[in-house]
Image (cartoon, rainbow, N blue to C red):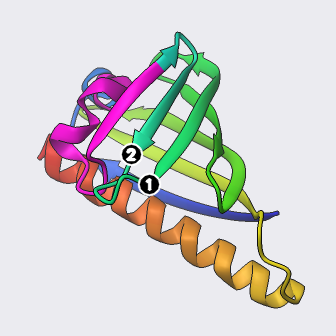
Amino acid sequence: MTTSNIKAIIQQDIHKVWETVTAVERYHTWRSDVSRTEWTDEKQFIEYTKNDYSTTFTITKAEPCRRWELDVENSHTKGHWTIVFTSKGCETQVDFTACVDAKQLSMRPVGKSVFEQTYMKKAQTQFITDLKKALG
């Protein structure tokens, strides 16, 4: 399993950041890589890319305005995301850690690790970039 971390300061109150990140049903309005989402139950949702590729998220911990943890799985990867929110006055620090394991790669460990790091870093960077744009 490979771990990647990204931290960012969002120019918005922690309550607004929390509300935006956890309002899964609105992802299609601000996430550039998501076309739609659907809840399967109160703890699980499926996110679809613009190409209709699905990823299932299962919420494992939700501490309002503090911490959101999710198990993540699609046909290529399986892992866990942890997003920690810290108030910095009128700003919010988002500390996003992703741990992912490639499912279908039978390459050398180094090749697998490079794939996992590339996948995670791209997903994390896109999420933070879109979140900053949405909250301006």
Q: Point out the residue furthest to the front here.
A: 52
Cα gap from disc 2 to disc 1, whole angstroms:
5 Å
The amino acid pointed to by label 2 is Tyr
How many neighbours does mark 1 have within 10 angstroms: few (below 14), some (14-19), or many (20 or more)? few
Residues 2 and 56: in front is: 56
Could you say which quadrant of the image residue 48 lies in? top left
Magenta highlight range: 19-39
> x, y (%) of residue 46?
48, 34
The reply to whether residue 11 is in sight is: no
Q: Which mark is residue 48?
A: 2
Residue at 62% across / 32% down in the picture?
A: 69
Q: Which residue is mark 1?
A: 53
Taking the spot 62% from the left edge, 44% from the top edge, the residue there is 81
**What residue do we see at 21% from left, 36% from top?**
12
Task: Say left or right for 27 vs 71.
Answer: left
Quarter holding the N terminus is bottom right
Q: Is residue 21 left or right of residue 69?
A: left
Q: Secondary structure at mark 2?
A: strand
Q: Is residue 32 above or below residue 92?
A: below
